[in-house]
Image (spheres, rainbow, N blue to C red):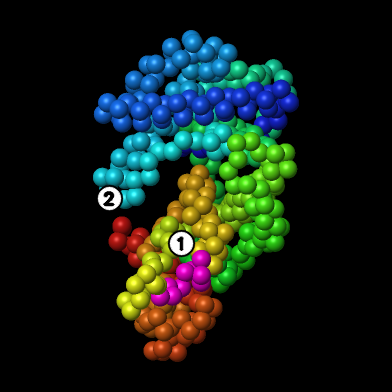
């Protein structure tokens, strides 16, 4: 099993400078490789690929020993592969008829990760095993102290260094991680995701939606208004401008950390208490897509109301809940614990009168009177709408298991 471990780095002041220089040089390499591809195709119609750019990397390092030459060769190859993957995705979207999204140049503030493809090649995890403090050695930076809050299992394959605001993190991708199966409980559960309640189980348990973005909305809005007073594009930011940008980034990072922590704790509780967990197979990208404009047939250039404002509020609540991230965390924890997670078709789960709870199985949009209340128009069965949805999710999971068997 593959697992990623994320640890906070505690670099010295000098190491922070070196880490920043490493990111800047990798960003410059990425942008130079992108410009190389653009220029070659525009002027000569030649397509440059990863192999050619990787072959030129040795000469680049030799000519710039104090810059590109001081960093790990393998990590620079990983940066060139990153660009190659961006172009591969660009051509794939063209073939699929989607919006292409040509690879763009990266600003220094938007290039925040350097990957070392193999432990021992330009980097070394636990580089000082003879001391009590865990450290990682990075070429050109030195032995950086790591806040290791849990043991690392398996074999370390790749090491990534990531910057988030003023914090630096180390991400270890480990292979051959042993599973840690939990004791069977014999319990099964269906889960209905929502925005009023984060989730509701088929047992009738509601987990409140913490709404971290709403909680920080006033402070975030004030910080964004202050940032908006500075010019949007400038060659060099002032000290006050940089401080305002850091304040906004810090608030977003705090919200992000709160959300992922909540997801981990909620998923852990579900996995600990149930052997089988069924949930809706949600397409959050489609659910949060903006509504199409409605041209007014009577007035050229005019548009009819399309509910975009109301949809924007719903989209914000869905994204704040982070359903997609939660379901990924749930699947990973279930795999490690030896539990079974079953995604089911979400259509009409909250509109179907649940036969397993004494309902008649009637399906109608009118069954859901409000966001919270369900009342069957055929038999009069009444219940909480989210509880009904979770019950129907569990029923569909049972049918899916029967079909597999």
Q: Observer-nearest residue: 50 or 279?
A: 50
Residue under the point 46% across and 28% down? 30
- The residue that label 1 is drawn on is 288
| Callout 2–callout 1 Cβ contact below 8 Å | no
Count residues near mark 2 (Cα–Cα under 10 Å), then give few for <14, some for 14-19, many for 20+. Answer: few
Residue under the point 42% across and 73% down? 306
Position of residue 399 in the picture relative to residue 266 (left or right): left
Residue under the point 52% across and 50% down? 329
Q: Classify residue 91 by image quadrant.
A: top left
Q: Position of residue 217 (x, y in %)?
A: 66, 61
Count residues near mark 1 (Cα–Cα under 10 Å), then give few for <14, some for 14-19, many for 20+. Answer: some
Q: Classify residue 84 by image quadrant.
A: top left
Position of residue 372 in the picture relative to residue 288 (left or right): right
Q: Earlier in the sequence, mark 2 or mark 1?
A: 2
The furthest residue to the front: 300
Q: Nearer the viewer, mark 2 or mark 1?
A: 2
Q: Position of residue 48 (x, y in %)?
A: 32, 26
Q: Position of residue 126 (x, y in %)?
A: 62, 23
Query: Label 2, label 1: how many angstroms apart (C-alpha)?
Result: 21 Å
Membership of 241 in magenta stretch: no
Q: Observer-nearest residue: 316 or 146?
A: 316
Q: How many marks on residues?
A: 2
| 311 versus 246 height, above or below | below
């Amino acid at each position: 099993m593959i697992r990623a471990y994320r640890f906070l780095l505690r670099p010295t002041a000098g190491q922070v400078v070196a880490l920043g220089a490493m990111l800047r040089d990798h960003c410059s390499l990425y942008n130079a490789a992108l410009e190389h591809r653009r220029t070659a195709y525009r002027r000569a119609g030649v397509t440059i690929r990863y192999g050619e750019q990787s072959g030129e990397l040795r000469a680049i390092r030799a000519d710039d020993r104090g810059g590109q030459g001081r960093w790990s060769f393998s990590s620079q190859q990983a940066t060139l592969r990153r660009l190659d993957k961006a172009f591969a995705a660009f051509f794939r979207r063209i073939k699929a008829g989607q919006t292409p999204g040509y690879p763009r140049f990266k600003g220094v503030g938007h290039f925040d990760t350097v990957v070392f493809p193999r432990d021992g090649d330009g980097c070394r995890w636990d580089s000082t095993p003879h001391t009590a403090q865990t450290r990682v050695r990075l070429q050109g930076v030195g032995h950086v102290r790591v806040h290791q809050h849990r043991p690392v299992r398996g074999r370390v394959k790749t090491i990534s260094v990531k910057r988030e605001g003023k914090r630096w993190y180390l991400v270890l991708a480990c292979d051959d991680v042993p599973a840690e199966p939990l004791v069977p409980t014999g319990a099964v559960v269906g889960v209905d995701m929502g925005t009023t309640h984060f989730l509701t189980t088929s047992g009738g348990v509601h987990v409140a939606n913490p709404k971290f973005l709403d909680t920080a909305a006033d402070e975030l809005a004030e910080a964004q208004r202050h940032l908006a007073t500075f010019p949007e594009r400038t060659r060099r930011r002032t000290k006050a401008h940089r401080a305002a940008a850091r304040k906004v980034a810090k608030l977003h990072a705090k919200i992000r950390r709160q959300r992922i922590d909540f997801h981990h704790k909620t998923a852990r509780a579900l996995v600990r208490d149930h052997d089988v967990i069924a949930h809706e197979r949600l397409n959050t990208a489609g659910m949060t897509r903006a509504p199409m404009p409605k041209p007014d047939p009577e007035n050229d250039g005019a548009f009819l109301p399309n509910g975009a404002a109301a949809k924007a509020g719903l989209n914000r609540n869905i994204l704040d809940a982070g359903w997609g991230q939660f379901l990924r965390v749930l699947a990973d924890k279930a795999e490690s614990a030896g539990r079974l997670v079953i995604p089911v078709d979400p259509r009409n789960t909250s509109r179907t009168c649940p036969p397993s709870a004494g309902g008649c199985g009637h399906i109608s949009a009118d069954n859901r009177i409000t966001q919270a209340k369900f009342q069957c128009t055929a038999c009069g069965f009444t219940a909480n709408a989210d509880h009904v949805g979770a019950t129907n999710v569990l029923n569909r999971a049972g049918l899916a298991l029967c079909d597999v068997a």
